Image (cartoon, rainbow, N blue to C red):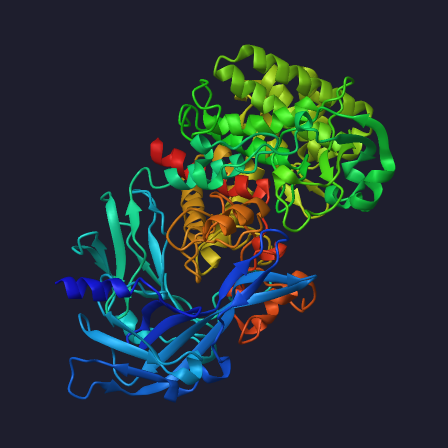
Amino acid sequence: MKKILLLLFSIFTMMILKGFEIDNVHLANKDILSFDIIDGKCIFNQKDGTGKIEGATVNPSELEKSNNYILKCPGETNSKITLIQIGRKSKGSQFVKSGEWKFEPRYTHTLYLRFSQPFKDKEKYQITVKNPATGCGDKSIEFIIDFKKMRSESIHISQIGFLPETAKRGFLSCWAGTMGAIDFSEAAKTGFEIVDKNGNSAYKGRLVLRRRADETGDDAYKNNFQGCDLYEFDFSDLRTPGEYRAVIPGIGCSFPFKIGNDVFANAYKTTVKGLYYQRCGCVLEPKHAGIEWARNRCHHPADGKKIEETNLPLTECSMGWGTLNQFQELPKRTTGKNLQFWGGWHDAGDWDRRSQHMYAASYLIDVTMLFPGVFKDGELNIPESGNGIPDIIDEAKWCLDFFKRGQEPDGGIKGGIESENHPVPGTQSWNDPLHLYAYAADPLSSYLFAWSASKLSRALKNFKKSKDAEEYLKAAEKAFEWAEKNGGEKYNDQRNAVAAELFATTEKESYHDIFKITSVWTRNPASSVKEYKKHDQQAGAYSYVACVPQEKTDKKLRELIVAALVKQADEWVATAEKRAFRFSGNLWRPMNWGLGSIPDVDELIAGYAAKKDPQYIEAIASSCAWTLGGNPLNMVWVSGLGTKRVTQVLHHDSWFMADGRGIADVVPGLVPGGPTAFKNQSKGIHGFSQRSFQPPMKNWPIAEQYAGNRYDPGMNEHTPNMIAEAAVAYAFMYAVGKK
């Protein structure tokens, strides 16, 4: 028994020698063995952020030669099994910066070996990779086939799980690189089985072909994201709480997942706390951050850090969607005054803090008020835990405190703080040598603050924090008045949103009048919520429907807005039905900057606020399943969450701490851009990622066009807004489960 257990354990361990690793041994199909060869080790230099690849020995040209592999079944007389086909897909799974604009990959080569006979359940096998391929001698690994325990990368399902009453689906597909798409038509005939944690059968059903490889429909550009036949299995009728695995006889099983009312709790808590790890201007103490991710205070004036005032608005600069280069212009526009201006969340891979982050704060507050009483104090273990306010609101308040701290006496809100350049390689937030500059106030930042601060005021009042609520409402109204006097009319959509929010909080008809004047439905009753390059009034529409007491609204206008929100949400539901993996969103949105990693469900939540239709919950649930493991890469797109998760995220502080402590991870709760199907971008950082793909990246399925290059902003950068967008989706499902 001990020997058998050791052999089983070998499936989930790596064979390591001189940087050569064999990992993830599994069956891709009944007669196809798959495993990863990971070549070399990344060695990082903490002093300057550079690194090198050591111990790489693999000869890629030898990987697709059949004489370099031997499969034996020791229990059989004639144990050698004939290899009849080889497939390979290779890409950088980790990168080091080896010089100025030079990045070197640590390769992961995924092999697919088709043999002359199917693999047998409960049988022991040995695969040997010979020296011409390894470059470091013949390497062997033994494993035992167990279809109920041996995980297969061909089976895609949420690693987090499902609420008892929502739909539950998994998928079967595999693109095997140079071998092409794997044919599962025979496997589909056997159906599937859901087994509990003890291996007992809980549900059986059939596999249904959902999308052929040559069928399009995943977006408006006629793409097929997965590039192969996709089979679906549905076990929605299974509602019993517990831990399960999906099993395809002859192939293997999925990652474990749960069914229960609390399955989204960890996803919600991890992502919201991801914003805590982005806090600026404070110590991250071990009792809150853990020993691994504790750090010193950063960017605080009390530590001698100067924050220089400028008269340059964020909206004139590229990071505020203007035209000026902020790095060039900010030093020219200083006023000679240093500010006591600190806090907020670090942005992306940099340490800047910009007014766009207030969208994230607003999202967090919205979901708490959509489900009153669900979110609790003390859920996240943050410094504010125990103050009587739900932690999720405290995290939003951290962001808004920053902008309130920098509010000018006349009410204007500064656009935030910018560094003089991108971070210096090898430095961390707490020893950042760069100069910091504060943007001047601008109407857009002022409107964003008034909008989100009004929400916060109402939320604080609900928790009997009347003094804080009054202060925030006063600050919100001052910011709104300033924007109105300083060119705010050009930001009609933001003005509309603020008016709706302030009306919801104060019930002053003057705000109601502004909302009606700025509403697109006042001018055109048939207007959609959004029209490309013309208007986006979802924020104001949401507040008017979800936050303003119905008896206080204009009846006709409210009806028009509800109809528009419902129509938009129905379009998102239709998208989920069209896409093979059933995730929602805008069909015109290309696969980049989060389509593969962030649930695109804001419109569905707005629709739910307008009309409590269960189909919106189902579409949100399916979109969450897509980002939490139910995708072709089987990846959970949240650091620190799930078994197979993203680790190579652009986060400088994490690199310093992880590389120095031997941690193969980053702080939890970060949500990167994910698969990024940029075409013909061979230059810049993304070019290094793209060139690591074999076959060429353009030949890979769109949903697999991702490399673990932590320097690549397109694939691996994150922002507070991206984190919050994912957090709100998971928080929504958490709240649905709690109701």
**Number of labelled discs?**
0
Q: Between residue 143 and residue 272, name the one nearer to us.
A: 143
Can the viewer see residue 587? no
> Residue 247 location, x and y as percent?
26, 62
Q: Between residue 328 and residue 514, name the one nearer to us.
A: 328
Q: Against 617, is 104 above or below? A: below
* Residue positioned 44% across, 38% down in the render: 291
Say which quadrant the N terminus sits in: bottom left
Instruction: Judge from the rendering whether residue 602 lies leftward or rightward of residue 483; answer left or right.
Output: left
> Residue 532 location, x and y as percent?
69, 48
> Residue 361 location, x and y as percent?
57, 32
Can the viewer see residue 256? yes
Q: Between residue 434 and residue 90, name the one nearer to us.
A: 434
Say which quadrant the C terminus sits in: top left
The extreme left residue here reads 1
Q: Against 34, is 405 above or below? A: above
Instruction: Judge from the rendering whether residue 482 lies leftward or rightward of residue 672; answer left or right.
Output: right
Q: Against 516, is 728 above or below? A: below
Quarter of the image where one finds residue 537 = top right
* Residue positioned 46% across, 18% down in the render: 387
> Residue 610 location, x and y as percent?
51, 33
Quarter of the image where one finds residue 73 = bottom left
Instruction: Judge from the rendering whether residue 548 lies leftward or rightward of residue 161; answer left or right.
Output: right
* Residue positioned 35% across, 83% down in the render: 69
